[in-house]
Image (spheres, rainbow, N blue to C red):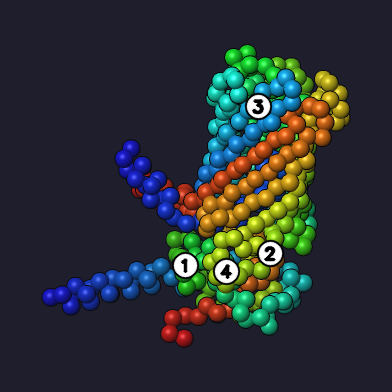
């Protein structure tokens, strides 16, 4: 155990470079490099309407590049609601597969996620309907479990250094008969400078990527397909490559409908460890 | 006595350094750039000063597998970028390979880097020379 702890400490000093996408909800076609581990922490904060409660929902993501065309991620999430309590809201296991070997004008990625969460979940990593229940108490929401399978088709393109991405979401909750739920996310982003300077600058434009994303629900097979009675947000996004292996992200999301919280504030920090897989293999005597 | 230890350490270091270089690298014959991509020229070819930015990008993105001097790590099966069989490839081919990667062989795609930065990497690759040359 001590050996593992020591190894993790050593790994933390290994630099990597994550030119991170600034999106919080939208996925593009770039996967984690094989053998690299990215540790990410995020918070989604909801500013309430009258009768709602403000909340802060932190989540941690461990993203590992299994191969060049397969990335796997584990999420652990929780939330704290003002005037209520702080609770663990579950975990998610996500896999993204890139079927095509080369870059194309449109690059598809297949996303499959299993969620073992409860109704108190408020991280809003995607929206399929009206968003989370922000009026009920956690003691009522936490016992209600959701075992959900979510599938996304990610289509992403790079045009003159602009990334344009669209995600089409279908989710099925196996805990209750809610039918199939649908959602979407679209994003567009670009680095503020495309030429790298020769010096090691931190605040220069090449280290920033800015863009905008829009995401929301598209109803379900039970309530009817379409954008009515669902939450929709438009959100500027910005990421800053603050060090060779760490980046910060920020996004204020504004609700376009009366559903859900009127404003969502999202913060994220990610740290990449290069060659994690081979270092771990060596530690346990395996082939790197 | 001390000089013997020094000599032994130097020899051992040199042996490790040579073993780390992937001079036996062989190209994947299936990893071929289309003719149109191979014919592209580097828009930064007349800006050699941009290679400094390329060096920075190389250190951030490439040394993990290709090593500080680009000679390629055997354990990563990475190309020795100093070899003539790499250096003889056109700028367009190198750009295409950086952009697309060869994911089944462990070379990731770097399409997430802006296009000019990928050309900066090509510019820097041209400066990689075997030690002593």
Q: Is residue B32 left or right of residue B83?
A: right
The label nearer to you, 2 versus 1, is: 2
Q: In the structure shown, which secondary structural element does the residue marked by tag 1 occupy?
A: loop
Q: In the structure shown, which secondary structural element does the residue marked by tag 3 occupy?
A: loop
Q: CA distance from mark 2 to mark 1?
A: 27 Å
Residue drawn at x 61%, y 54% as measured from the top left: A240
Residue A48 lies, in percent from the top left, at 70, 27
Q: Earlier in the sequence, mark 1 or mark 4?
A: 4
Residue drawn at x 81%, y 27% as measured from the top left: A258
Chain letter for mark 4, please: B
The label nearer to you, 3 versus 4, is: 3
Residue drawn at x 74%, y 22% as measured from the top left: A50
The label nearer to you, 4 versus 2, is: 2
Disc number placed over residue A193 in the picture, else none: 2
Q: Are marks 3 and 2 in contact (CB under 8 Å)?
A: no
Q: Is residue A169 left or right of residue A10?
A: right
- Residue pointed to by mark 1: B67
Farthest residue toward the bottom?
B133
Disc number placed over residue B8 in the picture, else none: none
User: Do circles 4 and 2 both sit on a common chain?
Assistant: no
User: Do circles 2 and 1 both sit on a common chain?
Assistant: no
């Amino acid at each position: 155990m001590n050996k593992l702890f020591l190894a993790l400490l050593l790994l933390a000093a290994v630099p990597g470079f994550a030119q991170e996408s600034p999106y919080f909800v939208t996925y593009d076609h770039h996967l984690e490099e094989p053998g690299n581990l990215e540790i990410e922490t995020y918070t989604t904060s909801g500013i309430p309407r009258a009768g709602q409660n403000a909340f802060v929902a932190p989540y941690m993501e461990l993203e590992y590049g299994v191969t060049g065309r397969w990335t796997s991620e584990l999420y652990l999430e929780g939330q704290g609601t003002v005037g209520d309590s702080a609770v663990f809201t579950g975990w998610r296991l996500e896999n993204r597969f890139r079927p095509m070997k080369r870059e194309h004008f449109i690059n598809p990625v297949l996303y499959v996620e299993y969620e073992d969460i409860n109704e108190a979940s408020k991280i809003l990593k995607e929206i399929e309907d009206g968003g989370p229940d922000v009026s009920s108490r956690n003691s009522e929401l936490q016992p209600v479990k959701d075992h959900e399978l979510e599938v996304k088709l990610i289509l992403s393109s790079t045009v003159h250094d602009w990334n344009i991405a669209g995600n089409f979401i279908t989710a099925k909750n196996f805990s209750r008969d809610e039918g199939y739920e649908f959602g979407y996310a679209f994003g567009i982003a670009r680095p503020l400078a495309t030429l790298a300077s020769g010096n090691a600058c931190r605040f220069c434009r090449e280290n920033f990527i800015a863009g905008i994303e829009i995401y929301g629900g598209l109803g379900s097979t039970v309530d009817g397909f379409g954008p009515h009675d669902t939450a929709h947000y438009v959100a500027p996004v910005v990421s800053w490559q603050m060090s060779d292996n760490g980046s910060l992200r920020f996004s204020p999301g504004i609700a376009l409908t009366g559903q859900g919280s009127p404003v969502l504030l999202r913060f994220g920090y990610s740290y990449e460890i290069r060659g994690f897989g081979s270092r771990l293999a060596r530690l346990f005597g395996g082939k790197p | 006595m001390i000089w013997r230890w020094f000599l032994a350490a130097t020899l051992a270091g040199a042996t490790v350094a040579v073993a780390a270089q992937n001079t036996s690298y062989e190209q994947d014959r299936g990893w071929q750039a289309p003719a149109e991509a191979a014919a592209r020229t580097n828009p930064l070819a007349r800006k050699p000063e941009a290679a400094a930015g390329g060096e920075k990008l190389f250190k951030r993105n490439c040394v993990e597998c290709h090593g500080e001097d680009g000679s390629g790590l055997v354990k990563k099966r990475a190309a020795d970028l100093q070899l003539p069989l790499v250096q003889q490839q056109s700028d367009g081919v190198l750009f295409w390979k950086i952009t697309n990667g060869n994911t089944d062989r462990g070379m990731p795609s770097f399409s997430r880097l802006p296009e000019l930065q990928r050309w900066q990497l090509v510019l820097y690759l041209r400066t990689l020379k075997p030690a002593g040359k």
